[in-house]
């Protein structure tokens, strides 16, 4: 396994450099045209291939395939997906939401909250229409696309659905957490956080919000009663290399058993953060690949997306790590870079987005059978980043 203590390769220009290249005109909510549904695209067919991984299936019978919603980072839409349909037939059409949609959170009533470069889009997933766009109050510069674009990134809902929490990237500087009142659809609070807030998570009791700040090597914890913040450095390889380093936190998962934050690094180290004390412990991992998205099943099984090697001469390719609560890991190889992972309600299926925050991502999702390790590819979405399972219709 490669030791990365000093590796700080630069994958792309820094956020400040990227900002100087932005030329798009800032859009506002009042000038945004009404969203319209777009027809399904016509990408290539999917394929199915076995892998060596054989995760233990969840208990109970197999549930019907859910409808999915994905954010199209390479477009200005979200796409509805039926994963039970083969190939292009899985694409149920798209709805315009705003420039470069990133994170996604869905309420039990089916309302989707989508973080875009322009603001937070509100989508009625049953009517399949955008009903509102809540503009960012944080000044992020011109609206644009690409890896370092300003605007909304990670997003999460409070447990009672009354608030949407969105991490807002400010190119060249620290970001903010904007708090949206979901009833009035207005920003009611702005909290300073770190640089490039990739991910936002909420504690089980709703008392804290956790913002994973990619470019400042930390997690910002936010008290939802007082809006007081605390910075916890999460840098198991150190912070050498600064903005040019690969070895930074990307996404976090809240462990169901104790509320600890779990942040994977490089398929080698899992940072386990106690948000109450700020203590960070590190456990070994085995995939040896650059890791991004992560989610935890109700039983504590962790699913981690490996995007591919930093150094192809020494590192492994893309994969999905399935890690049981006792630390045992199985690897499912993936075809090409991926970004995030979401589970079906019965945890028998993992949906892995084929988009990528850097160049190199592809259209489509990879569907992973967690019992057999078999994968299939659905050619849906345009560089999809976030994936959400929609609630069943009443």
Image (cartoon, rainbow, N blue to C red):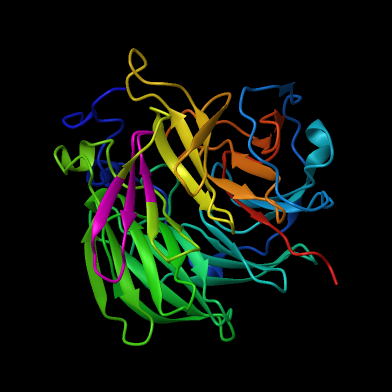
Image location (x, y in percent) of residue 148: 36, 46
Q: Look at the picture and state if 191 lies above or below 278.
A: below
Looking at the picture, how far across and down is residue 43, in whole percent? 72, 29
Can you tell which quarter of the image residue 35 is in?
Answer: bottom right
Above or below, comparing residue 96 to residue 30 in the picture: above
Q: Residue at x 72, y 29 (%)?
A: 376
**Is residue 200 on the magenta stretch?**
no
The relative height of residue 238 versus residue 188 in the rendered view (above or below) is above
Quarter of the picture containing the N terminus is top left
Snapshot quadrant of residue 167: bottom left
Q: Point out residue 359 in the picture as x, y percentages from the top left corner.
A: 44, 31
The picture places residue 189, in percent across and down from the top left corner, at: 38, 81
Considering depth in this image, is 48 or 204 the residue closer to the camera? 204
In this view, the residue in front, 146 or 106, is: 106
Q: Would residue 100 be seen by someone viewing this image from the given angle?
A: no
Q: Residue at x 71, y 56 (%)?
A: 345
Horizontal side of residue 227 vs 47, given as left or right: left
Residue shown at 21% from the left, 42% from the top: 243
What span is in magenta? 263-282
């Amino acid at each position: 396994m490669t030791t990365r203590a000093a590796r700080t390769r630069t994958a792309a220009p820094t956020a400040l450099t990227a900002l100087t290249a932005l030329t798009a005109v800032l859009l506002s909510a009042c000038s945004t045209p009404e969203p319209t549904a777009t027809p399904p695209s016509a990408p290539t067919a999917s394929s199915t291939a076995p892998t060596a991984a054989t995760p233990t299936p969840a208990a109970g019978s197999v549930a019907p395939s859910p409808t999915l919603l994905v954010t199209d980072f390479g477009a200005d839409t979200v796409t509805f997906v039926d994963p039970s349909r083969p190939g292009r037939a899985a694409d149920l059409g798209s709805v315009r939401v705003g420039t470069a949609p990133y994170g996604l959170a869905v309420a039990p009533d089916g309302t989707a909250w989508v973080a875009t470069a322009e603001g937070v889009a509100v989508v009625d997933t049953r009517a399949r229409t955008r009903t509102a766009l809540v503009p960012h109050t944080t000044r992020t510069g011109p609206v644009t696309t690409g890896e370092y674009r300003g605007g909304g990134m990670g997003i999460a809902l409070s447990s009672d659905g009354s608030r949407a929490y969105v991490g807002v990237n400010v190119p060249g500087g620290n970001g903010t957490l904007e708090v949206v009142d979901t009833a009035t659809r207005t920003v009611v609070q702005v909290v300073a956080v770190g640089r490039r807030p990739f991910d936002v998570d909420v504690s089980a009791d709703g008392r804290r919000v956790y913002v994973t700040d990619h470019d400042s090597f930390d997690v910002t914890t936010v008290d939802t009663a007082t809006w007081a913040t605390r910075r916890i450095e999460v840098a198991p390889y150190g912070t050498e290399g600064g903005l040019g380093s690969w070895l930074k936190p990307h996404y976090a998962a809240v462990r169901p058993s104790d509320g600890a934050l779990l942040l994977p690094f490089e398929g080698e180290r899992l940072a386990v953060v106690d948000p109450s004390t700020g203590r960070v412990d590190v456990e070994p991992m085995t995939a040896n690949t650059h890791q991004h998205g992560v989610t935890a099943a109700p039983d504590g099984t962790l699913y981690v997306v490996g995007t591919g090697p930093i150094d192809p001469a020494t590192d492994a390719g893309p994969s999905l790590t399935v890690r049981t609560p006792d630390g045992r890991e199985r690897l499912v190889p993936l075809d090409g870079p991926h970004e995030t992972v979401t589970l079906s309600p019965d945890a028998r299926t993992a949906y892995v987005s084929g988009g990528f925050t850097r160049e190199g991502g592809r259209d489509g999702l990879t569907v992973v059978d967690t019992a057999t390790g078999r994968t299939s590819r659905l050619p849906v979405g345009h560089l999809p980043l976030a994936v959400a399972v929609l609630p069943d219709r009443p």
